[in-house]
Image (tube, helix red, strand yellow):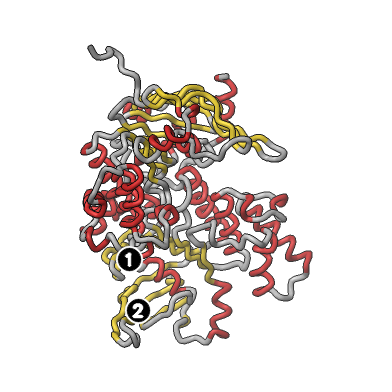
Amino acid sequence: MSALLEITDLQVHYPLRAGLLGRHHDVVRAVDGISFAVPRGKTVGLVGESGSGKTTTGRALVRLAPVTAGSIKYDGVELTGLSDHAFFAYRKRIQMIFQDPFNSLNPRLTIYQILAEPLEIHFPKQSRAERENRVTELLRLVGLEATHLYRYPHEFSGGQRQRIGIARALAVEPEFIVCDEPVSALDVSVQAQIVNLLRDLQDKLGLTYLFIAHDLAVVEHVSDDVLVMTGGKIVEAAPAEQIYAHPRHEYTRKLIDAVPTL
Amino acid sequence: MPDPTPAPLLQVENLRISFHGRESIVEAVKGISFRLEEGRTLAVVGESGSGKSVTALSLTRLLPPPPGCKVTGRILYRGKDVLTANASELQKIRGKEIAYIFQEPGSSLNPVFSVGWQIAEAVKLHLPQIKDVRGRVVAALKDVGIRDPEKRYDAYPHELSGGMQQRVMIAMALACEPHLLVADEPTTALDVTIQKQILDLLREVRHRHRMSTILITHNFGIVAGFADEVIVMFRGQIVEAGSVATVLREPKHPYTQALIACIPRLGVRARRLTTIDYSKIEAALAAAS
């Protein structure tokens, strides 16, 4: 099967300036030369601690972080050199779900406004009725009711807000979703619901996921392949069923040890 | 001659907490009772909205005053009812006897003061007899495994990682040598690897300081190997209580069973995670009452 996303030697470096004139020049190598591929319709898990560069990797894919060097090939097209105008089409195909459902929804907008905004940008020709139908359909898709349409984010629980975040990502009919710690801020019971929802949506819509998290138990569960990242580098890549049974890298073993056992 | 059955460190009887809005009354805790013996660790497990955090806050009357919030029942700390204590008695309990650490260290610390200053404030308030406050704070920072404590004294919260901030919170709680530490979701905002470090640290300090501990959490996964007793809360009620070993091995209530079942396990790649069927639990509750 051909890969939908292919990353080769990706680097994201941030310059560090110190001193009065900001001269002393050093760089933080947030992502330091990583390569991996995500096959269409599959889930690749990216696991690591805070500061490992996993979030930066995800953000680089949607141009929320600057790429220093390397190649990002999406569906055969090199994304790194594209102009913003040419990249616009890919914003629709690649979407992102964020970690914190409390801070990633605008508190002053109703759920309808939150979900209609990406539609207005990417489907400007849609009529108002079409748009309303689509928003209602999206809510149903993520397990919310049409009666929730004109409420504000603060009226929802953490799990419901994450459902809204997912609906917003799905609004523009993407193929690829970067899930950046989508369940880390949730109760374990709600985490299970959201993980199942992502699974169901993948089956129904044929989505491809890059699933970023720090909890190896969750990543192992949702992913086909798992990448383990630390210090900006991928230290282990293996199919999910092998990563727990035969961890090869010492850091992977550390992550496994950190998972609480019942 | 010592009393053959000493009073428990903490005894909560028929605790009810309700919040009174303009049009509605929300009963967050519906008459719960539990006790904690000296030197033991109690875990309170439940989901968001189960009433576990307001229960923790009520132990030192940290909830808003009436009429906004009404607390009834009895909270006996060393035999003395916290709910009828006056301001100066409360002052002695808060921080000195019962100390807290909260979920988000980033928002519990004051961003405009150095961490050393913030710990020093607590020390000066509760232990006025101590002359070398700075030395005491440095010792407290060292105690929780912060390297270069002298230098870190002057660090501001934003200069520290989440794990380090939580260590500072623990140092602050321990600086006044409390007898009871209430840890309200101390690791929820942290990475699993940091979670393990913080739990190991808490286990070590409570042993060293011979402290009793209450751990509030939504995750049964961190209860095993940490607490002696557990109570499981669902919508303001205790649905199950017992020793951790027994409850984990043979959970009796369907809610407890569901909470344990929804934790993802390593090496078990089921297609779907188990979720909680609330209608089943409501039916079980209705049948019980």
Point 52% across, 28% down: residue: B237
With A136 as the anchor, is B19 left or right in this view? Answer: left
Residue B266 seen: no
Point 58% across, 26% down: residue: B283
**Helix, strand, or loop for circle 2?**
strand
Which subunit holds the residue at mark 2? A
**Helix, strand, or loop for circle 1?**
loop
In the rendered image, which residue does mark 1 sit on? A52
Camera-side residue: A40 or B45?
A: B45
Residue B214 sits in which quadrant?
top left
Q: Name the residue type under label 1.
A: Ser
Q: Position of residue B138 (x, y in %)?
A: 23, 54
Residue A7 sits in which quadrant?
bottom left
Residue B182 sits in which quadrant?
top left
Point 41% across, 66% down: residue: A55
Point 38% across, 64% down: residue: B158
Q: Position of residue B231 (x, y in %)?
A: 42, 29
In the rendered image, which residue does mark 2 sit on? A13
